[in-house]
Amino acid sequence: MQQKGIDLYLMVNSDPHESEYLPEYWKCITWLTGFRGEVATVIVTQNEALLWTDSRFFLSGDQQLADSGFQLMKMKVDIPVETWLNNYIKQSVNPPVIAGDKRVIFGKMADFITMDKDLISPLWEDRPTLPQGKIEIYPDAYNGVSAAEKIRRVLDCIHREDGKGALFLKALDEIAWVLNLRGSDIHCTPVFISYLLLSETRKVLFVDDAKLTQEVKMYLQNLGIETAPYEEAPLTAEKGLHYTTNNPIPLMKAIKNPVEIEGYRKAMLKDGIALTRFYHWLEDALKAGETITELDCVDKLIHYRSSFEDYREESFDAIVAWNEHGALPHYEPRPESNVTIQGDGLLLIDTGGQYLDGTTDITRTIGVGKVSDAMKRDYTLVLKGHIRLATAVFPKGTRGDQLDALARLDLWRDGKTYRHGTGHGVGHYLGCHEGPESIRMEHNPQILEEGMLFSNEPAIYLGGKYGVRHENCVLVRPFDVKNEAPDATPCDLSEHGEFLCLETLTLCYIDTSCIDRNLLTVDETNWINNYNRRVYELVSPYLEESDRIWLKQKCVNLI
């Protein structure tokens, strides 16, 4: 910075495709700071080094930045990065030279930033190369709609009378979805590094040729898509085309078709079978006094999932968090943090799988040994919030932020809350986290539509003690008053409109040993009993006898 006359250098934890998980090549902030969270903004001046992240990484960030020279800045707690930058500029005697790499975008602040300064590459001598995984065709039997039809729908959305409408895609999951192709370039996400130009006159996939098999080349040729080197994409601005910023793909991708929904059901069943085997193994091993660590659980989860032929990988790095580690929302066990599960307390396990027919995401919190009354109370309050959202009925046109309070209400009444969102969209053999829908306190204008699938995951975290989270995946579907609420007073739908509800797809038992039954209503007790009964009915036929007997005990009705 001194050599180049730069007063302030700005970095964001991102890649040119705004991926959630980064290839090693683009993990510049991790290389510089040691911080491993997905969300980070870094500012380095001649006198300070600051890193902003969100509440999921406050505790782990403190640990990872220790002795790094970087100060942790907490989003929504400390001064926002934009405000900090504004103050820095105002307090400077002369206009400061502010630089960042070309991925930095800060709205109006971008006017002050020279976005072509990469200070990392010259210093990172052993920087990894970009991944070179082969691209695969994702069969229509899994996705339900051909790539030709998807492209036609997209072009219809961006159509202009002069035929010059164009869409330039950089999000890897959008490219994979619209082309019905998958890859292995991004950790836990079956996508491939590329850009895609779609217009009525030209379609171009910018990708490294080494990633293309002859089969994929023929497939693209049949779709009328030409290929060009990946590096040429930023330089390609087709003259005469009008690029739209109104991208229809995120919403198209979020509304699952019947084939995708059926695929999710199959994937959830496989996951339920694998998780039943896992939790049975874990309980028996702990009772037998075996030494079981958090990382042992990670290995076993992969072992049981990989018994299914169409399992590909985990959908994210498993969170296996014993007691105080459970208070770190995105804790991932590593050799330096790995602990043995022993004594009394709560074990939080957030995990998911990538199957060819769907992506799963599930969290369970289970009791080990003696569980305190305080733990049972928090466990039950979080579960009550989960049930409130799972049983929500709402009119068409409702947004996710209008439902978020349902999951928090019982915690709020106890003077507690959690700072992350309650639900996120889940991709179909794509990214485990997707939009545009969400369930969170912050306003999101996207309404919830039939066919959307997202997580239901309220939680509570007590620093240094434990965490509780209950997570299932739910599907938005029509609410049939006649069948699902037969006691309701008949009404005129023309006056009140149509209603939607949520169907829980995840199939894994809920541990009832940690529940404070005095806190449950009759309806909540019935919901838990019905859910566990359904899990047993659907999962047990695929289990060996010992696992089936064990699961039946876990699914016994609460009285």
Image (cartoon, rainbow, N blue to C red):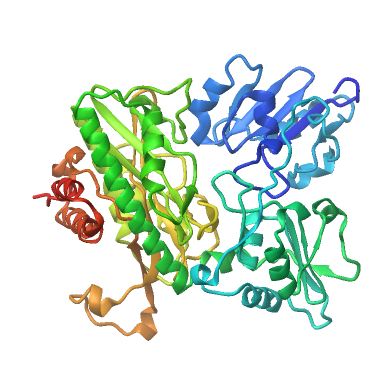
- Tally of marks: 0
Front-lying residue, 199 or 490: 199
Does the rendering let one see residue 416? no
Task: Give the quadrant of the N terminus.
Answer: top right
414 or 438, which is in the foreground?
A: 438
Residue located 27% across and 47% down the image: 276
Q: Position of residue 101 (x, y in %)?
A: 79, 38
Residue visible at 47% across and 32% down in the picture:
332
Q: Is residue 272 visible?
A: yes
> Please, which residue is most extreme toward the left here?
559
Instruction: State which quadrant residue 82 falls in.
Output: top right
Q: Is residue 553 left or right of residue 265?
A: left
Image-based side of 416 in relation to 318, left or right: left
Residue 207 percent location from the top left of the image: 76, 55
Q: Is residue 412 left or right of residue 441?
A: left
| Residue 130 horizontal/vertical position (percent) | 72, 42
Q: Is residue 541 toward the left or the right of residue 234 in the image?
A: left
| Residue occupying image coordinates x 72% and y 29% | 43
x, y percentage for residue 438?
49, 55
Q: State the residue at coordinates (63%, 73%).
A: 150
> In the picture, residue 146 is in which quadrant?
bottom right
